[in-house]
Image (tube, grey):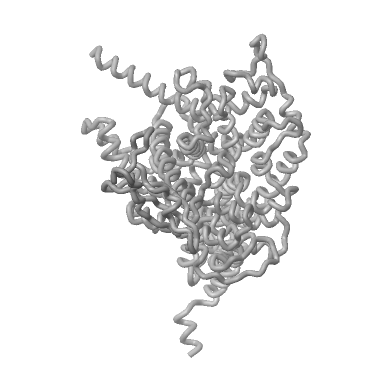
Amino acid sequence: MMNKQVFKISKKVVFWCVVAIIFVYMLFPFYWAVNSSLKTESQLQMTPATFIPRNPHTLKVDFTLDNYRSIFTNDKFIHGLLNSTIVSTMTTGLALVVGSFAAFALGKLRFRGKTPSLYLILSMTMFPQVTVLSGLYAVINKLNISALPGMILSYMIFTLPFTVWVLTSFFKSLPRELMQSAQVDGATPFQTFYKILLPLTAPALVTTGLLAFISAWNEYLFSLTFTAIEPASRTVPVAIALFTGTVSRQEPFGEIMAAAVVVTIPLVVLVLIFQRKIIAGLTAGAVKG
Amino acid sequence: MFKKRKTVGMTELGKREQRLAYWLLLPTFLILFTIAFYPLVQVFYTSLTDKTFASNQETNFVGLQNYHHLLGMTIKELPPVIDEDTGEQLLNPDTQKKVYERAIRILPREPVRFRELFQFGFLGRRYVVGAVDREFIRAMGDTISFTIFSVLLETLLGLGIALVVNSHFKGRGVMRATMLVPWAVITVVSARIWEFMLSPTRVGFFNVVLQKLGLGDGQIAFLRLPEWSMPSLVAVDVWKTTPFMALLILAGLQLIPKSLYEAAEVDGASSIRQFFTITLPLLRPSLAVALVFRTLDALRVFDVFQVLLAQSRYSLASYNYYQLIGNRAMGLASAIGVVIFVLIFAFAMLYMKLLGVDTE
């Protein structure tokens, strides 16, 4: 009897240790960024590095907001934020509008060539984007558009297929009677789409929109390539990757960490708010595929 | 005739529906054609030329020359150096190892020069492997080993985390939210955070910790030393992408009916047995999807290589970028793109076969 209880308790202890390890592992690097962003240049150079900002001489807790002040007066960072916001928002909007059209057709309408269309779009999600890097550059040059619209258009390559995929399975799950009764009332199929079905897909739109936004906000390769000769259009990931100090020759890690925290917090907040919906959305998109 | 076709075909309403469907699909296909299909054809064609990026230089058709350059490899035997006095193989006076001819003198120089990739011994003889584009072959090897190690670790960690957050305990919601944090961090940003943590002095977190544990001298240059740079990169990638893996596996776990576990409980099966007889087999489809997603993603890795290793070591994608922007060799870059394309599709096909992914 005693043995069984000991076994039960030790099992619980092990479980909570595992939970604690996961918790620390997932959060620690981000904590380290916050910690470093609150240090001055001399505190950053302290050896060994301290787990909270401390005064180099007295070792008392001592932090500074200078790094945040300096990144918010840094034009490159502000421009990057602005460019990223424009590109990610427009990408998400375009993907949702165009994607919901296609998804409605694929999920609810009857037409010839439906299966090949669906497979063609599905195959796009496996498409290696790096492959077309040079070809895409040529296309954007030929279309004679600048880097920002160029990025928005080229980000469709990874947002659009995913959006169509998830939304199609969502449209399919809506009862067909909804459409039929609307048609009996004299609505055209397109009216049925945007007046009745589209509002019903709102939850799926939110999830896919968020995922599209995150992947556009994250994108680095295309942005780095297309802004190579147009530095004013750089997005935040590129700006942070190429961050160099204004004064010191050494890499300004305090400022980089502050920038890292600033661009991460909005996304973390978004992800935490929509946590349940993301899990549900990924289930619909990934597992059914 | 006309009447007959109408009855066999569809009603006026059905026709209108079909027309609407085509109109609705048009924008999607137009966009995908512009940014995927057309560039892909362009890349295939450009890979057969010597096109220079962003210049007015004349472009010539060069056939498969770019591919020869990228994939050209050779194996040569290194003859032993014979001591003229004894007639035996010369030994290195310091290490007492046998001396062979230098690789640089054995590898062919005409029509193109091969550079030494590595040497190996086999059945008492010594061989050297040479490549025309040493950097590219290394990038390919690095990308593949990066993919194998990071995907393997992510899957194991992701499975563990998914199992934990799928069980009932107080604070499960908090843990599910925590688990998503690394996923929300921009890849480049996470690379720079880790870059700082991996600093080559005790300014960096890892050198502090390792030194406290009595390992290393607190001066380990994680990103410079060849034996440390790949594990470091894998660690960065695993932290960032494990959440995605855990999410997909969690989704799969939730599809397994609870009643199966209840039945197993009644039968007195231990939880380890339940894991191997219920969880793992039923998880296979979701695990397969997650593996395919992550493998294809890891094969085209760019951000962490570019930010952390700059030009010292390449992934396929960062080599592609370097050739296109840095070297302006658009023809060669396109050929690299085609090689990546073929490699990724080979992996995708292999997975589908091995894991039996249902495409329906």
**Residue at the farthest bottom position:** B1
Height in image: A207 above or below B346? Answer: above
Number of callouts:
0
Q: Measuring 46% from the left and 40% from the top, which residue is drawn there?
A: B247
**Quadrant the C terminus of chain A occupies:** bottom left
Of B103 and B190, nearer the camera is: B103
Of B165 and B205, nearer the camera is: B205
**Quadrant the N terminus of chain A occupies:** top left
**Residue at the farthest left position:** B267
Residue B346 in the image: x percent, y percent? 41, 58
Residue B281 in the image: x percent, y percent? 30, 44
Height in image: A60 above or below B242? Answer: above
Q: Is residue A249 shown left or right of residue B293?
A: right
Report if residue A199 is visible in the image. yes
Q: Is residue A243 shown left or right of residue B280?
A: right
- The picture quadrant where one finds residue B52 is bottom right
Of B22 and B195, nearer the camera is: B195
Q: Is residue A230 shown left or right of residue B178?
A: right
Report if residue A175 is visible in the image. no
Residue B180 in the image: x percent, y percent? 52, 35
Height in image: A256 above or below A125? Answer: above
Q: Measuring 56% from the left and 28% from the top, which residue is drawn there?
A: B200
Residue B347 in the image: x percent, y percent? 40, 54
**Residue at the farthest front position:** B85
Q: Is residue A237 shown left or right of residue B41?
A: right
Q: Measuring 72% from the left and 29% from the top, which residue is drawn there?
A: A68
